Amino acid sequence: MHGRETDRVKAIGTALEILEILRDANGARVTEVADELGVSKSTVHDHLATLRERGFVERDGDRYVVGLRWLRFGGHARDDLELFQHGQIPATNLARETEELSVLSAFYGTNSVPVYQARGSKAVTTDSYPGLELPIHATATGKAMLANLSTETFEAVLDEIDLDRHAKNTIVDEDELREDVQRTRERGFSLDDEERIDGMRGIGAPITHEGSGEVLGALAMTGPTHRVRGERFREEYPQLVSNVAREIEINVTHQRAQHD
């Protein structure tokens, strides 16, 4: 790669790092970004000026924040997903029936990423939102997807992830996680029993393509422990979530068959 091309690639990398800093910090000053990256303030300022000119960042006083133009890109990426196209309405109906929060998530890297959320009338507000990368070992959607990955992919994910603790019941031991994933495979749904957020439980079911077995994502419903408990947690909601996930699978498989 020639010198000019190398410089261009480095510049793109720096711009992306700046955007990630602004996202994670919910906005930052030029000095803060420069200190984080270990580059000069003038370099950061030049990048921010270009990004601002194109609408990718905005200025708020002496701070810079991620710009609204990213909504166009995020919306386009989400709208292209079969998971979203065929899962949005069923997930909304699930939230309405349970009165809790329902979530459609995709497998991304080593994380579970919500692409759509629907709030029932009693849904509890949490820190989750579409696009947030959540720990795959500590969420109902994540464990549902883990249980349906190929052996090779499953082992690769385990090699990459850190089994960090997020709540009192987070699984932080690899052998215990393997056992939990095996139970999920056998029963067909996953359980999050206060594993990411204390006081919250979730039930997840995988969404796969019937023909190829490809993991498209997972569906889950979550709610507070005082409502999601007993038979609701162990039988009623798992059956309901599994049925809705199956409905989404059928829709995706049928749509693909029409285009083959």
Image (spheres, rainbow, N blue to C red):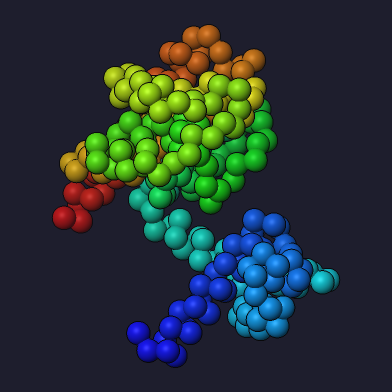
Residue beneath the point at 55% across and 69% down = 16
Residue beneath the point at 49% across and 9% down = 231
Residue beneath the point at 20% across and 52% down = 258
Task: Locate residue 156: give its quadrant.
Answer: top left
The answer to whether residue 49 is left or right of residue 63 is left
Q: Nearer the viewer, residue 109 or 175?
A: 175
Q: Residue furthest top?
A: 230
Which quadrant would the C terminus be assigned to in this image?
bottom left
Q: Is residue 253 above or below residue 189?
A: below
Q: Position of residue 219 (x, y in %)?
A: 43, 35
Task: Locate residue 228: give its quadrant.
Answer: top right
The answer to whether residue 73 is left or right of residue 46 is left
Q: Can residue 141 be seen?
A: no
Q: Can residue 126 be seen?
A: yes
Count the marks: 0
Q: Residue furthest front?
A: 38
Q: Position of residue 68 (x, y in %)?
A: 64, 67
Q: Nearer the viewer, residue 107 or 222?
A: 107
Task: Locate residue 49: give its quadrant.
Answer: bottom right
Q: Residue furthest right?
A: 61
Q: Nearer the viewer, residue 33 or 220?
A: 33
Residue beneath the point at 29% across and 19% down = 186
Q: Position of residue 60 (x, y in %)?
A: 79, 69
The answer to whether residue 141 is left or right of residue 149 is right
Which quadrant would the N terminus be assigned to in this image?
bottom left
Q: Position of residue 66 (x, y in %)?
A: 66, 66
The answer to whether residue 249 is left or right of residue 80 is left
